Amino acid sequence: MNWIKEYDIISTNKSVILKAIQLPFGDKEDACQYYTALYNNIDYFVSRNKKDYERYASVLAIYTPLEYLEIYNCEC
């Protein structure tokens, strides 16, 4: 499990959540995850629901799990 050292758990806060739920995401949980990623200056976001985020992909790259594995040649 050497690959796990490359990952970290990120946090959010009340203001991020309040901002996320006010925006036009169809799924508020998706909005919270997306804006938490932005708040933490994440380079990309991995989701099985890529279509839910496509409208916002110009701000933050969105990958499906398979795309992520192909791009980063992960041997997990």
Image (cartoon, rainbow, N blue to C red):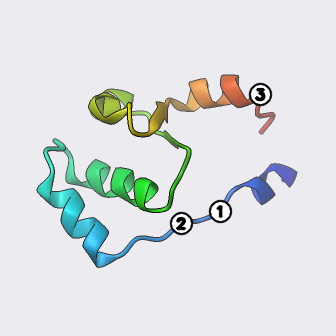
The type of residue carrying mark 2 is Ile
Residue at mark 1 to residue at mark 3: CA–CA distance? 19 Å
Image position of 62 (left or right of 28): right
The type of residue carrying mark 3 is Asn
Q: Quadrant of the C terminus?
A: top right
Residue at mark 2 to residue at mark 3: CA–CA distance? 23 Å
Q: Is residue 69 above or below residue 3?
A: above
Q: Earlier in the sequence, mark 1 or mark 3?
A: 1
In the picture of the structure, the residue carrying the numbered disc 2 is 10
In the picture of the structure, the residue carrying the numbered disc 1 is 8
Q: Quadrant of residue 74?
A: top right
Q: Earlier in the sequence, mark 2 or mark 3?
A: 2
* x and y percentages locating residue 24 in the rendered image: 13, 44
| Element type at mark 3 | loop
* x and y percentages locating residue 55 in the rendered image: 27, 30
* x and y percentages locating residue 68 in the rendered image: 61, 31
* x and y percentages locating residue 31 in the rendered image: 27, 51
The type of residue carrying mark 1 is Asp
| Element type at mark 2 | loop
